[in-house]
Image: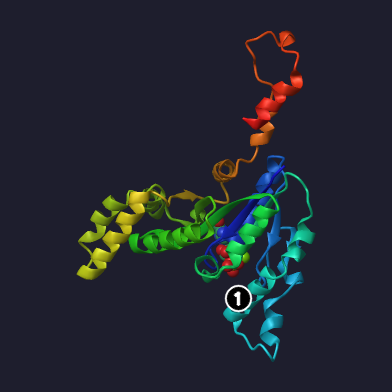
Amino acid sequence: MPRYAQLVMGPAGSGKSTYCSTMVQHAETINRSIQVVNLDPAAEHFSYPVMADIRELIEVDDVMEDDSLRFGPNGGLVFCMEYFANNFDWLEECLGHVEDDYILFDCPGQIELYTHLPVMKQLVEQLQQWEFRVCGVFLVDSQFMVESFKFISGVMAALSAMVSLEIPQVNIMTKMDLLSNKSKKEIEKYLDPDMYSMMEDKALTLRSKKFKKLTEAICGLIDDYSMVRFLPFDRTDEEGINIVLQHIDFSIQYGEDLEFKEPKESEEDPLTNTNYDEFFQDKVED
Ligand SMILES: Nc1nc2c(ncn2[C@@H]2O[C@H](COP(=O)(O)OP(=O)(O)OP(=O)(O)O)[C@@H](O)[C@H]2O)c(=O)[nH]1
Ligand SMILES: [Mg+2]
């Protein structure tokens, strides 16, 4: 039986830890169990109960204070994550082997972890070996996305994580509750973006020809592959949170096995079908 994981990623301050605690609370209200692992070695506060905390393995402050290493905060974080990648047995011990577990991994905010360092990819591969179905959840702060150019840079960050991790990914715009009504309207068009029309809107305002060409090329690429779209996330809206959770569950087929166990309504008289073992076996293998 598989286990399920969400890798909660995104730039610093995009709302990853808040997303995790919101999901834990939401799970309680719908009678489900979701647990969280903190993977940020520099985390100071989060308001969810942790199943495991990377700071028990290694902490950024200790690395920075070490005279032989002398790292700053970012180099220190990379060091910690590489140390973590060499010590996955620590994580294995913390996670145990409980079937059907559903775990959120609250990741650090340094974007280079998802774009060109191998650590997160190694983590994904390790989780898959432990029979986790992993979904990437990439968060971007909606406040930075009310203009096309900022939006494109958010899209590119999400896309590079998606391409480098090679797992299903759900992209989310966080902090929707902070937007004014005008900004909410503005942002609606970005949720299911038709990149070409957006490009036309803004084309006249661009001064540099080269910049315009580059923007056109990027928009064209993203539109052609229709790979990036965003779901809104407002932590005060239970219904919206549920929709986000459903999208993620669907991408990792959570609940599929539960549904498969339901007896099907057969047109045949059930009493004539005496080989019940074969009947249920077929359903599981479908
Ligand atoms: N109003 C509102 N505030 C939010 C929301 N999500 C996050 N915040 C606030 O944004 C700030 C950063 O949120 P965090 O959840 O710590 O962000 P993070 O991505 O975990 O940050 P790092 O771990 O430092 O990268 C906090 O002050 C949160 O209270 C939201 O949906 N609505
Ligand atoms: Mg955090």
The location of residue 91, given as percent across then percent down, is: 74, 62
Query: What residue did someone put label 1 on?
Result: 78
Question: Dot 1, crowdedness within 10 Å: few (<14), some or many (≥20)?
Answer: some
Residue 21 visible in rendering? no
**Image position, residue 253 (x, y; %):** 60, 40
The answer to whether 168 is drawn above or below residue 282 in the figure is below
Is the N terminus in the top left, top right, bottom left or bottom right quadrant?
top right
Q: Quadrant of ligand 1?
A: bottom right
Q: Quadrant of residue 284?
A: top right
Q: Residue at x 70, y 60 (%)?
A: 37
**Scheme of image coloration:** rainbow
- In this orientation, which residue lies closer to the viewer: 36 or 3? 3
Asked if residue 177 lies left or right of residue 223, the reply is right
Task: Say whether residue 223 is left or right of residue 95.
Answer: left
Q: Residue at x 71, y 25 (%)?
A: 280
Observer-nearest of 197 and 188 = 197
Indicate whether 17 appears above or below 194: below
